Image (cartoon, rainbow, N blue to C red):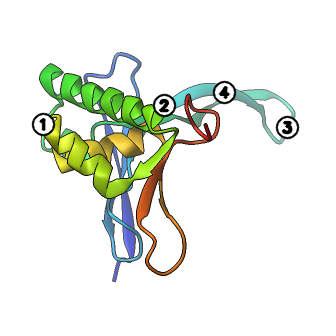
Amino acid sequence: MVRSAIGFARDPEAEDASCVMSLIKSNIAPMGTPSLRYMIAPASVRADDGQPTSVGRFELVGESDQSVSDLLNHTPVSRDEQSERSEAREWLMNYLVDAGGRAEAGRVIKAAEAAGLSRDQVKKARIKIGAKSVKAGFACGAWEWVLPEGAEGAGA
């Protein structure tokens, strides 16, 4: 039985020739893990005989809005979807900065919905901007979304 599987797919529309890597099956980790974009870059290494030889080097580029499933099912992200995702990230960053770098998750989601964003959009935006979901205190503490150290407004 497979405990988890990672898929890889070439993105034919990527201007930088990058590809996508996604968690496609798992019963040991959350499926909300973001997809990653990567490239195979040329590199030179010394072979056993001391001579240089060319190889490919796996380089992570960053997170991807597309998943391997999207690419394999030929469902590219439209410009409208990209714009909506960018708008959600910008809204969330501004909200958290205005809140001093952290805010209760439930309140953030309610404010996002009032601003016309869906729960899924704002949750994906949290991942994209690098905000963490942390338990505020023990036992009955609420979950908070916290900007990473060094982000504008974090720790303010």
Residue 19, position as x, y percentages in the image: 38, 34
Residue 39's disc is 2
Residue 140 in picture, x, y percent from top left: 43, 78
Residue 49 circle label: 3
Give the distance between the C-alpha atoms of the residues marked 4 and 2, in whole angstroms: 12 Å
Question: Badge 1 is on which residue?
Answer: 75
Q: Between label 4 and label 2, give the one nearer the viewer.
A: 2
For the residue marked with disc 4, what is the amino acid?
Ala
Q: Is residue 31 left or right of residue 98?
A: left
Q: Cβ–Cβ below 8 Å for labels 4 and 1?
A: no
Residue at the image position 38 percent from the left and 44 percent from the top = 126
Q: Amino acid at mark 1?
A: Thr
Q: Secondary structure at mark 1?
A: loop
What is the quadrant of residue 23 in the picture? bottom left
Q: Which residue is mark 4?
A: 43
Picture quadrant of residue 86 = top left
Query: First in sequence: mark 3 or mark 4?
Result: 4
Crowding at mark 1 (Cα within 10 Å: few <14, some 14-19, many 20+)? few
Q: Position of residue 48 (x, y in %)?
A: 83, 42
Q: Is residue 44 above or below residue 107?
A: above
